[in-house]
């Protein structure tokens, strides 16, 4: 099966440890801390319910969200270009034979960097504006809520049986996003920066990044605040069985039983944290 570019992008950006990377950044109005939803096979986000709204949760027939829901204040930061795992960086010397304008860059840039890869996939993410890191400090209350309401969720939203259902508890969002991604080794991306950068790949508030030529082009999102990474909790269905199936056949404490539609059936569901890609997310 050919993997979607969005899935390859997600896995290749894990090394930054910001969470689940979105190849198509989602509007913050649809994906934000406390919202319930699911990702389809193309990593497109589908919101279901805002758990921050207690009245909406009650009206939908679900149990209330309980526990310590400590919300962290947004933390603003700036990033230099973020690259996929197999991307290499080459400093381009300005001078004879190296004119910034021929690379699609302003003449007054202080430096130029070229990104490429010898592997099968590469990507560069550039966020021109400040990135807001925000969410809830504790994920356990949200995971407990998912387990209590799993049967009703899987029943009300059949697609979640295939894709799982999750709650976003932390997001990284901004308003000026540019992504270039490519497959194959014969591609490159050029990025320039103004004088005053602390170093390539280490942005400071005074650093301005300029997008130059990209052999596969740039995807640009400047219309609204969008999420580029997120983390949270998720449950998904596993195998079907009968109530008599012994618990000893379940693997680990991350699996739990969900009553099925009839008395003789149940779902074995699995809980996991999403966004802790560097050591938790399963590739299967």
Image: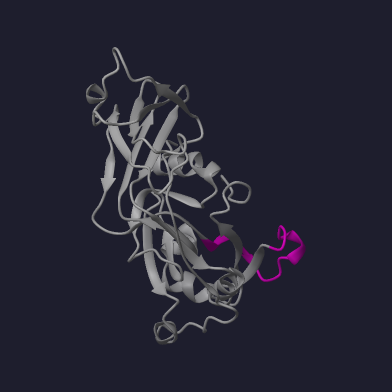
Q: Nearer the viewer, residue 268 or 283?
A: 283
Residue at the image position 36 percent from the left and 25 percent from the top: 188
Taking the magenta stretch, the answer to whether it contains residue 251 is: yes
Give the x, y percent position of residue 159.
42, 62
Judging from the image, the colouring scheme is one colour
- Quarter of the picture containing the C terminus is top right
Q: Quadrant of residue 89?
A: top left
Q: Is residue 222 above or below residue 199?
A: below
Q: Is residue 148 above or below residue 14?
A: below
Taking the magenta stretch, the answer to whether it contains residue 176 is: no
Give the x, y percent position of residue 168.
47, 64
Q: Is residue 242 above or below residue 207?
A: below
Please indicate, yes or no, whether residue 226 appears anywhere in the rendered image. Answer: yes
Q: Is residue 178 above or below residue 60?
A: above
The residue stretch that appears in magenta:
232-253
Residue at the image position 27 percent from the left and 58 percent from the top: 224
Residue lying furthest top: 96
């Amino acid at each position: 099966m050919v993997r979607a570019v969005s899935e390859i992008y997600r896995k290749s950006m894990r090394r930054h440890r910001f969470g689940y990377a979105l190849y198509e950044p989602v509007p913050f109005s649809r994906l934000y801390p406390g919202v319930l939803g699911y990702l389809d096979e193309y990593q497109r986000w589908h919101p279901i319910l805002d758990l921050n709204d207690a009245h909406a949760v009650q009206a939908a027939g679900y149990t209330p969200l309980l526990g310590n829901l400590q919300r962290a204040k947004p933390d603003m930061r700036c990033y230099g270009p973020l690259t996929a795992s197999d991307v290499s960086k080459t400093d381009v010397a300005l001078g004879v034979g190296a004119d910034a304008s021929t690379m699609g860059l302003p003449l007054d840039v202080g430096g130029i960097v070229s990104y490429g890869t010898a592997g099968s996939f590469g990507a560069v993410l550039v966020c021109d504006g400040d990135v807001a890191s925000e969410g809830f400090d504790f994920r356990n209350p949200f995971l407990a809520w998912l387990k209590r309401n799993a049967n009703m969720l899987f029943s009300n939203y059949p697609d979640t049986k295939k894709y799982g259902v999750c709650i976003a508890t932390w997001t990284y969002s901004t308003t000026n996003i540019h992504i270039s991604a490519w497959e194959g080794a014969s591609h490159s991306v050029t990025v320039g920066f103004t004088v005053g950068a602390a170093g390539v790949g280490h942005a400071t508030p005074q650093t301005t990044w300029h997008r130059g030529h990209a052999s596969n082009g740039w995807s640009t999102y400047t219309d609204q605040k969008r999420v580029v990474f997120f983390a949270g909790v998720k449950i998904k269905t596993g195998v079907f069985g009968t109530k008599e199936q012994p618990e000893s056949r379940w693997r680990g404490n991350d699996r739990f039983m969900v009553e099925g539609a009839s008395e003789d059936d149940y779902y074995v569901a699995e809980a996991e944290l999403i966004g802790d890609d560097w050591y938790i997310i399963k590739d299967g």
